[in-house]
Amino acid sequence: MSASGSFLIYCIELYRRAKSLSGRAAFDLFHQTGADDYVRQSFGALHTVGEQYVLDDIDGFVKSRLAVK
């Protein structure tokens, strides 16, 4: 598995725990909002920052995508 793929799994698990979601619900939410692609494309920057920053960044991205729909 690629480094960005492993990081995506880490981010889904991080988000799942923070939001008290099941693994399936978190995975579906990432796919539905495009957060999975966002994490992969932002891997270069996101993997260098702290856990709370990553969580806040992804949460903001997800919320912005849900607000549009």
Image: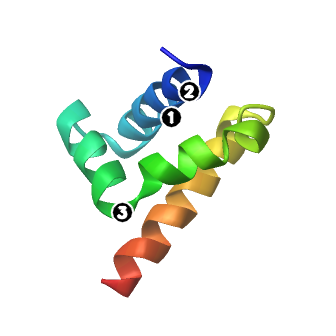
| Residue type (three-letter) at the residue carrying disc 1 | Cys
| Residue type (three-letter) at the residue carrying disc 2 | Phe
Give the image quarter of residue 49: top right
Q: Extreme front residue here?
A: 2
Give the secondary structure at mark 1.
helix
* C-alpha gap between disc 3 and disc 1: 14 Å
Residue at 75%, 34% in the rendered image: 50
44 sits to left or right of 66:
right
Residue at 65%, 43% in the rendered image: 54
CB of mark 3 within 8 Å of CB of mark 2?
no
| Residue type (three-letter) at the residue carrying disc 3 | Thr
Determine which of the numbered discs, if any, sits on residue 33 in the image: 3
| In this view, 29 is above or below 69 | above
In primary-sequence order, the first of circles 3 and 1 is: 1
**Nearer to the camera, 55 or 65:** 65
CB of mark 3 within 8 Å of CB of mark 1?
no
13 sits to left or right of 20:
right
CB of mark 2 within 8 Å of CB of mark 1?
yes
Q: In this figure, which residue is indicated by the disc labeled 1?
A: 11
In primary-sequence order, the first of circles 3 and 2 is: 2
Q: How many marks?
A: 3
Give the image quarter of residue 9: top left
Determine which of the numbered discs, if any, sits on residue 43 in the image: none
At which x and y percent is residue 67? 39, 82
Q: Is the residue marked by circle 2 packed among few (<14), some (14-19), or many (20+) residues within 10 Å?
A: some
Q: In this figure, which residue is indicated by the disc labeled 2?
A: 7
Give the secondary structure at mark 3.
helix
Q: Is the residue marked by circle 1 packed among few (<14), some (14-19), or many (20+) residues within 10 Å?
A: many
* C-alpha gap between disc 3 and disc 2: 18 Å
